Amino acid sequence: MFANIQAKTTWDIEGNMLWGYFFTSPNESELQKIGTELVSNGYCLVEIRELESDTPQAASEWQLHVERVEPQTVDTLFTRNTQLGDLASHYKNVTYDGMDVGPAD
């Protein structure tokens, strides 16, 4: 990912970037709890939203989106993803669903 961004953009990928992190759960209240913990650790809450389903009978699925402007390297991002996955495991039916990145404006 880092090499691809360096090759295809003018972003300073190892400088301050806007990193978004995502969690999912069938239980909105669990996402509110983990969101509160993340905000207390310096993340900005973007939203908790219900995801649209392809089938009307499917159970509701919710997504938490938090962001933080920070520098990352391949190693620090690996560590961050591991930490967030571990954090999610402490909440009932919460899954760490990955991240995205963009320029910090």
Image: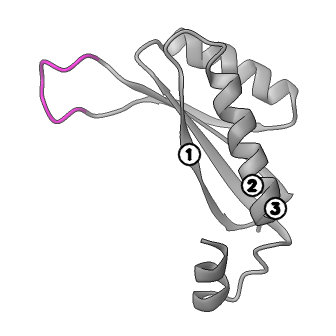
Residue 34 image point, x, y percent:
68, 19
Vertical arrangement, residue 71 with respect to residue 47, above or below: below
Local secondary structure at mark 2: helix
Q: Main secondary structure of the magenta part?
A: loop
Q: Is residue 103 left or right of residue 48?
A: right
Label 3 Cα crowd, 10 Å radius (few <14 / some 14-19 / many 20+):
some
Q: Which residues are magenta?
A: 53-59
- Please name the residue that numbered disc 3 is placed on: 72
Q: Is residue 55 magenta?
A: yes
Residue 53 image point, x, y percent:
23, 32
Q: Nearer the viewer, residue 67 or 81?
A: 81
Callout 2–callout 3 Cβ contact below 8 Å? yes
Which quarter of the image is occupied by the N terminus? Answer: bottom right
The alpha-carbon separation of the residues under discs 2 and 3 comes to: 6 Å
Q: Earlier in the sequence, mark 1 or mark 3?
A: 3
Q: Residue at x 75, y 35 (%)?
A: 83
Q: Nearer the viewer, residue 56 or 80?
A: 80
Q: Which mark is residue 98?
A: 1
Vertical arrangement, residue 26 with respect to residue 42, above or below: above
Choose top left, top right, bottom left or bottom right for residue 64: top right
Local secondary structure at mark 3: loop
Q: Amino acid at mark 1?
A: Gly
Q: Earlier in the sequence, mark 2 or mark 3?
A: 3
Q: Earlier in the sequence, mark 1 or mark 2?
A: 2
Q: Is residue 28 magenta?
A: no
Q: Amino acid at mark 2?
A: Leu
Q: Residue furthest left?
A: 56
Residue 70 image point, x, y percent:
85, 57
Which quarter of the image is occupied by the C terminus? Answer: bottom right
Q: Is residue 68 left or right of residue 84?
A: right
- Please name the residue that numbered disc 2 is placed on: 77
Q: Is residue 32 left or right of residue 79?
A: left
